[in-house]
Amino acid sequence: MSWFKRESAPLDAPGEKRVRTEGLWVKCDGCRQIIWKKDLDQNLNVCPTCERHFRVDAQRRLELLFDDGQFEVFDNGLRSTDPLSFVDLKAYPDRLRQAQAETGLSDAVINATGKLDGRHIVISAMAHNFIGGSMGAVVGEAITRAIERALQHRTPLLVVSASGGARMMEGIVSLMQMAKISAALARLDDAKVPYISLLTDPTYGGVTASFAMLGDLNIAEPGALIGFAGPRVIEQTIRQKLPAGFQRSEFLLQKGFLDAVVHRKELRPYLARALNFMAAAA
Protein backbone atom coordinates (compact mmCIF):
# COMPACT_ATOMS: atom_id res chain seq x y z
CA MET A 1 0.00 0.00 0.00
CA SER A 2 1.46 3.40 -0.91
CA TRP A 3 0.32 6.92 -0.17
CA PHE A 4 -0.41 9.75 -2.60
CA LYS A 5 0.68 13.28 -1.71
CA ARG A 6 -0.35 16.43 -3.49
CA GLU A 7 0.11 20.14 -2.85
CA SER A 8 -2.21 22.85 -4.12
CA ALA A 9 0.44 25.36 -5.19
CA PRO A 10 4.14 25.49 -6.18
CA LEU A 11 6.59 25.68 -3.31
CA ASP A 12 7.57 29.23 -4.23
CA ALA A 13 4.01 30.58 -4.56
CA PRO A 14 3.95 33.66 -2.28
CA GLY A 15 1.10 34.21 0.16
CA GLU A 16 -0.70 30.89 -0.52
CA LYS A 17 -1.35 28.19 2.04
CA ARG A 18 -0.07 24.75 1.24
CA VAL A 19 -2.75 22.03 1.29
CA ARG A 20 -1.40 18.68 2.45
CA THR A 21 -3.34 15.59 1.45
CA GLU A 22 -0.84 13.00 2.65
CA GLY A 23 -2.74 10.10 4.15
CA LEU A 24 -6.02 11.10 2.51
CA TRP A 25 -5.45 8.97 -0.59
CA VAL A 26 -4.51 5.33 -0.92
CA LYS A 27 -3.38 3.29 -3.91
CA CYS A 28 -5.04 -0.06 -4.51
CA ASP A 29 -2.50 -2.85 -4.92
CA GLY A 30 -4.97 -4.68 -7.14
CA CYS A 31 -5.91 -2.20 -9.86
CA ARG A 32 -3.40 0.59 -8.98
CA GLN A 33 -6.17 3.16 -8.79
CA ILE A 34 -5.90 6.09 -6.39
CA ILE A 35 -8.81 6.08 -3.92
CA TRP A 36 -10.04 8.84 -1.64
CA LYS A 37 -9.62 7.26 1.80
CA LYS A 38 -13.01 8.46 3.01
CA ASP A 39 -14.67 6.75 0.03
CA LEU A 40 -12.74 3.56 0.84
CA ASP A 41 -13.92 3.64 4.46
CA GLN A 42 -17.53 4.14 3.37
CA ASN A 43 -17.19 1.17 1.01
CA LEU A 44 -16.21 -1.15 3.93
CA ASN A 45 -12.53 -0.93 2.93
CA VAL A 46 -13.20 -2.60 -0.42
CA CYS A 47 -11.81 -1.06 -3.62
CA PRO A 48 -14.75 0.38 -5.62
CA THR A 49 -12.98 -0.42 -8.91
CA CYS A 50 -11.62 -3.97 -8.59
CA GLU A 51 -13.27 -4.99 -5.27
CA ARG A 52 -9.97 -5.89 -3.66
CA HIS A 53 -10.55 -6.36 0.07
CA PHE A 54 -8.19 -4.19 2.11
CA ARG A 55 -7.18 -5.42 5.55
CA VAL A 56 -9.14 -3.93 8.45
CA ASP A 57 -8.11 -3.83 12.10
CA ALA A 58 -9.88 -5.79 14.82
CA GLN A 59 -11.81 -2.81 16.20
CA ARG A 60 -13.16 -1.91 12.75
CA ARG A 61 -14.00 -5.57 12.10
CA LEU A 62 -16.19 -5.69 15.20
CA GLU A 63 -17.92 -2.45 14.24
CA LEU A 64 -18.78 -3.94 10.84
CA LEU A 65 -20.16 -7.17 12.28
CA PHE A 66 -22.21 -6.14 15.30
CA ASP A 67 -25.61 -4.45 15.01
CA ASP A 68 -25.13 -0.67 14.91
CA GLY A 69 -21.45 -1.21 15.68
CA GLN A 70 -22.34 -1.72 19.35
CA PHE A 71 -20.57 -4.35 21.45
CA GLU A 72 -19.08 -5.05 24.87
CA VAL A 73 -15.42 -6.04 25.15
CA PHE A 74 -14.42 -8.63 27.75
CA ASP A 75 -11.18 -10.21 29.02
CA ASN A 76 -9.11 -7.33 27.64
CA GLY A 77 -6.75 -7.08 30.63
CA LEU A 78 -4.58 -10.13 29.81
CA ARG A 79 -0.86 -9.44 29.31
CA SER A 80 1.90 -11.60 27.84
CA THR A 81 4.93 -12.59 29.90
CA ASP A 82 8.40 -13.38 28.56
CA PRO A 83 8.80 -17.12 29.27
CA LEU A 84 11.99 -17.49 27.20
CA SER A 85 13.65 -14.12 27.98
CA PHE A 86 13.58 -13.79 24.20
CA VAL A 87 15.74 -11.24 22.36
CA ASP A 88 16.12 -10.81 18.59
CA LEU A 89 16.57 -7.28 17.23
CA LYS A 90 15.01 -6.13 20.49
CA ALA A 91 13.85 -7.69 23.72
CA TYR A 92 10.39 -9.26 23.58
CA PRO A 93 8.99 -7.07 26.41
CA ASP A 94 10.09 -3.99 24.45
CA ARG A 95 8.40 -5.32 21.33
CA LEU A 96 5.21 -5.91 23.30
CA ARG A 97 5.23 -2.40 24.76
CA GLN A 98 5.76 -0.93 21.28
CA ALA A 99 2.86 -2.92 19.81
CA GLN A 100 0.60 -1.97 22.71
CA ALA A 101 1.46 1.72 22.30
CA GLU A 102 0.92 1.66 18.52
CA THR A 103 -2.37 -0.27 18.54
CA GLY A 104 -3.93 0.53 21.90
CA LEU A 105 -4.47 -3.21 22.40
CA SER A 106 -3.09 -5.48 25.12
CA ASP A 107 -2.45 -8.28 22.60
CA ALA A 108 -3.43 -9.59 19.16
CA VAL A 109 -7.12 -10.33 19.78
CA ILE A 110 -10.28 -8.56 20.95
CA ASN A 111 -13.11 -10.52 22.57
CA ALA A 112 -16.55 -8.94 22.34
CA THR A 113 -20.20 -9.80 22.77
CA GLY A 114 -23.27 -8.18 21.26
CA LYS A 115 -25.92 -8.84 18.64
CA LEU A 116 -25.71 -9.74 14.96
CA ASP A 117 -29.06 -9.31 13.23
CA GLY A 118 -30.71 -9.32 16.64
CA ARG A 119 -29.07 -12.58 17.77
CA HIS A 120 -26.60 -12.65 20.67
CA ILE A 121 -23.14 -13.71 19.56
CA VAL A 122 -19.58 -13.88 20.88
CA ILE A 123 -16.84 -12.71 18.49
CA SER A 124 -13.06 -12.99 18.82
CA ALA A 125 -11.34 -10.77 16.26
CA MET A 126 -7.60 -11.14 15.73
CA ALA A 127 -5.44 -8.05 15.18
CA HIS A 128 -2.83 -8.49 12.45
CA ASN A 129 -1.30 -5.12 13.28
CA PHE A 130 -0.18 -6.48 16.68
CA ILE A 131 3.06 -8.41 15.99
CA GLY A 132 1.52 -9.90 12.85
CA GLY A 133 -1.51 -11.19 14.75
CA SER A 134 0.73 -13.93 16.12
CA MET A 135 -0.73 -16.42 18.58
CA GLY A 136 0.92 -16.42 21.98
CA ALA A 137 -0.33 -17.38 25.43
CA VAL A 138 -2.64 -14.36 25.70
CA VAL A 139 -4.30 -14.98 22.33
CA GLY A 140 -4.78 -18.66 23.24
CA GLU A 141 -6.23 -17.81 26.65
CA ALA A 142 -8.48 -15.05 25.28
CA ILE A 143 -9.97 -17.23 22.53
CA THR A 144 -10.42 -20.10 25.00
CA ARG A 145 -12.30 -17.76 27.34
CA ALA A 146 -14.49 -16.63 24.44
CA ILE A 147 -15.29 -20.29 23.71
CA GLU A 148 -16.11 -20.93 27.37
CA ARG A 149 -18.36 -17.85 27.48
CA ALA A 150 -20.19 -19.05 24.37
CA LEU A 151 -20.55 -22.49 25.98
CA GLN A 152 -21.81 -21.08 29.29
CA HIS A 153 -24.48 -18.91 27.65
CA ARG A 154 -25.09 -21.25 24.68
CA THR A 155 -24.32 -18.34 22.38
CA PRO A 156 -22.93 -18.80 18.84
CA LEU A 157 -19.22 -18.10 18.44
CA LEU A 158 -17.45 -16.37 15.55
CA VAL A 159 -13.64 -16.20 15.38
CA VAL A 160 -12.12 -13.84 12.81
CA SER A 161 -8.59 -15.00 11.99
CA ALA A 162 -5.89 -12.62 10.76
CA SER A 163 -2.53 -14.03 11.76
CA GLY A 164 0.92 -15.07 10.67
CA GLY A 165 0.74 -18.06 13.00
CA ALA A 166 2.34 -18.97 16.32
CA ARG A 167 4.41 -16.33 18.15
CA MET A 168 8.02 -17.46 17.91
CA MET A 169 9.05 -15.33 20.92
CA GLU A 170 7.06 -17.67 23.19
CA GLY A 171 8.24 -20.94 21.68
CA ILE A 172 6.49 -24.10 22.90
CA VAL A 173 4.10 -21.99 25.03
CA SER A 174 2.71 -20.57 21.80
CA LEU A 175 2.40 -23.98 20.14
CA MET A 176 0.48 -25.33 23.16
CA GLN A 177 -2.31 -22.87 22.41
CA MET A 178 -3.26 -24.90 19.32
CA ALA A 179 -4.23 -27.89 21.49
CA LYS A 180 -5.76 -25.72 24.20
CA ILE A 181 -8.15 -23.91 21.84
CA SER A 182 -8.95 -27.09 19.90
CA ALA A 183 -9.90 -28.92 23.11
CA ALA A 184 -12.21 -26.05 24.11
CA LEU A 185 -13.82 -26.14 20.66
CA ALA A 186 -14.41 -29.88 21.06
CA ARG A 187 -16.43 -29.15 24.22
CA LEU A 188 -18.38 -26.50 22.31
CA ASP A 189 -19.10 -29.02 19.56
CA ASP A 190 -20.27 -31.63 22.08
CA ALA A 191 -22.73 -29.05 23.41
CA LYS A 192 -23.92 -28.35 19.85
CA VAL A 193 -23.21 -24.61 20.12
CA PRO A 194 -22.50 -23.17 16.64
CA TYR A 195 -18.96 -22.06 15.79
CA ILE A 196 -18.22 -20.12 12.60
CA SER A 197 -14.65 -19.47 11.48
CA LEU A 198 -13.97 -16.45 9.25
CA LEU A 199 -10.54 -16.47 7.62
CA THR A 200 -9.21 -13.11 6.42
CA ASP A 201 -5.98 -11.96 4.79
CA PRO A 202 -3.63 -13.40 5.97
CA THR A 203 -4.29 -16.58 7.97
CA TYR A 204 -1.21 -18.80 8.35
CA GLY A 205 0.74 -21.23 10.46
CA GLY A 206 -0.59 -22.70 13.69
CA VAL A 207 -3.79 -20.66 13.47
CA THR A 208 -4.71 -22.36 10.18
CA ALA A 209 -3.55 -25.69 11.59
CA SER A 210 -5.95 -25.43 14.53
CA PHE A 211 -9.03 -23.32 15.26
CA ALA A 212 -9.27 -21.47 11.93
CA MET A 213 -10.17 -24.72 10.15
CA LEU A 214 -12.33 -26.27 12.88
CA GLY A 215 -15.54 -24.32 12.38
CA ASP A 216 -18.93 -25.84 11.78
CA LEU A 217 -18.77 -23.38 8.90
CA ASN A 218 -15.42 -22.21 7.48
CA ILE A 219 -15.69 -19.09 5.30
CA ALA A 220 -13.24 -16.53 3.97
CA GLU A 221 -13.11 -13.12 2.35
CA PRO A 222 -12.23 -12.85 -1.36
CA GLY A 223 -8.54 -12.95 -2.19
CA ALA A 224 -7.41 -13.85 1.34
CA LEU A 225 -4.09 -15.66 1.65
CA ILE A 226 -4.58 -18.82 3.71
CA GLY A 227 -2.12 -21.61 4.39
CA PHE A 228 0.42 -23.15 6.73
CA ALA A 229 3.78 -22.30 5.19
CA GLY A 230 4.19 -19.48 2.67
CA PRO A 231 4.24 -20.11 -1.11
CA ARG A 232 7.95 -19.33 -1.45
CA VAL A 233 8.86 -21.83 1.28
CA ILE A 234 6.73 -24.50 -0.40
CA GLU A 235 8.23 -23.84 -3.85
CA GLN A 236 11.75 -24.08 -2.42
CA THR A 237 10.86 -27.32 -0.63
CA ILE A 238 9.15 -29.19 -3.47
CA ARG A 239 11.13 -27.42 -6.24
CA GLN A 240 8.04 -26.99 -8.36
CA LYS A 241 6.10 -24.00 -9.60
CA LEU A 242 2.85 -23.56 -7.72
CA PRO A 243 -0.45 -23.13 -9.62
CA ALA A 244 -1.93 -19.68 -10.16
CA GLY A 245 -3.89 -18.37 -7.20
CA PHE A 246 -2.35 -20.94 -4.86
CA GLN A 247 -3.41 -20.32 -1.21
CA ARG A 248 -5.96 -17.67 -2.17
CA SER A 249 -9.39 -18.25 -0.68
CA GLU A 250 -10.94 -19.00 -4.08
CA PHE A 251 -8.35 -21.74 -4.67
CA LEU A 252 -9.07 -23.27 -1.25
CA LEU A 253 -12.82 -23.19 -1.93
CA GLN A 254 -12.28 -25.05 -5.19
CA LYS A 255 -10.20 -27.69 -3.38
CA GLY A 256 -12.77 -28.17 -0.61
CA PHE A 257 -10.98 -26.51 2.31
CA LEU A 258 -13.62 -23.77 2.64
CA ASP A 259 -17.40 -23.78 2.62
CA ALA A 260 -17.80 -20.33 1.05
CA VAL A 261 -16.03 -17.15 -0.02
CA VAL A 262 -18.14 -14.20 1.04
CA HIS A 263 -17.83 -10.57 -0.08
CA ARG A 264 -17.51 -8.17 2.85
CA LYS A 265 -20.72 -6.38 1.84
CA GLU A 266 -22.60 -9.69 2.03
CA LEU A 267 -20.96 -10.93 5.21
CA ARG A 268 -23.50 -9.79 7.81
CA PRO A 269 -26.59 -11.14 5.97
CA TYR A 270 -24.70 -14.37 5.16
CA LEU A 271 -23.80 -14.88 8.83
CA ALA A 272 -27.38 -14.08 9.90
CA ARG A 273 -28.76 -16.74 7.53
CA ALA A 274 -26.17 -19.27 8.66
CA LEU A 275 -26.95 -18.70 12.33
CA ASN A 276 -30.69 -19.00 11.69
CA PHE A 277 -30.11 -22.28 9.88
CA MET A 278 -27.90 -23.63 12.68
CA ALA A 279 -30.44 -22.62 15.33
CA ALA A 280 -33.24 -24.36 13.45
CA ALA A 281 -31.14 -27.50 13.01
CA ALA A 282 -30.12 -27.70 16.68
Image: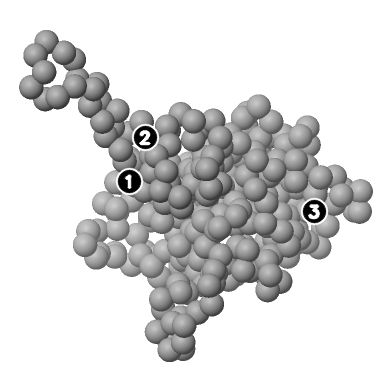
The answer to whether residue 214 shows anywhere in this view is no
Furthest-top residue in this view: 15
In the image shown, does 49 or 203 lie closer to the viewer? 49
Which residue, given by chain and number where applicable, does mark 2 sit on?
25
Which residue, given by chain and number where applicable, does mark 1 sit on?
2
Circle nearer the viewer, 3 or 2: 2
Q: Secondary structure at mark 3?
A: loop
Q: Callout 1: 10 Å neighbours few (<14), some, many (20+)? A: few
At a point 56% along the width and 58% down the height, the residue shown is 223
Counting from the top left corner in percent of width and height, residue 154 is at 79, 47
**What amino acid type should be assigned to the residue bearing mark 3?**
Val
**In the image, which disc is placed on residue 193?**
3
Q: Earlier in the sequence, mark 1 or mark 2?
A: 1
Q: Callout 3: 10 Å neighbours few (<14), some, many (20+)? A: many
At a point 56% along the width and 37% down the height, the residue shown is 44
Q: Earlier in the sequence, mark 3 or mark 1?
A: 1
**What amino acid type should be assigned to the residue bearing mark 1?**
Ser
Q: Secondary structure at mark 2?
A: strand
**What amino acid type should be assigned to the residue bearing mark 2?**
Trp
Residue 32 in the figure: left or right of residue 50: left
**Distance of label 1 from label 2 (alpha carbons):** 9 Å
At a point 22% along the width and 26% down the height, the residue shown is 7
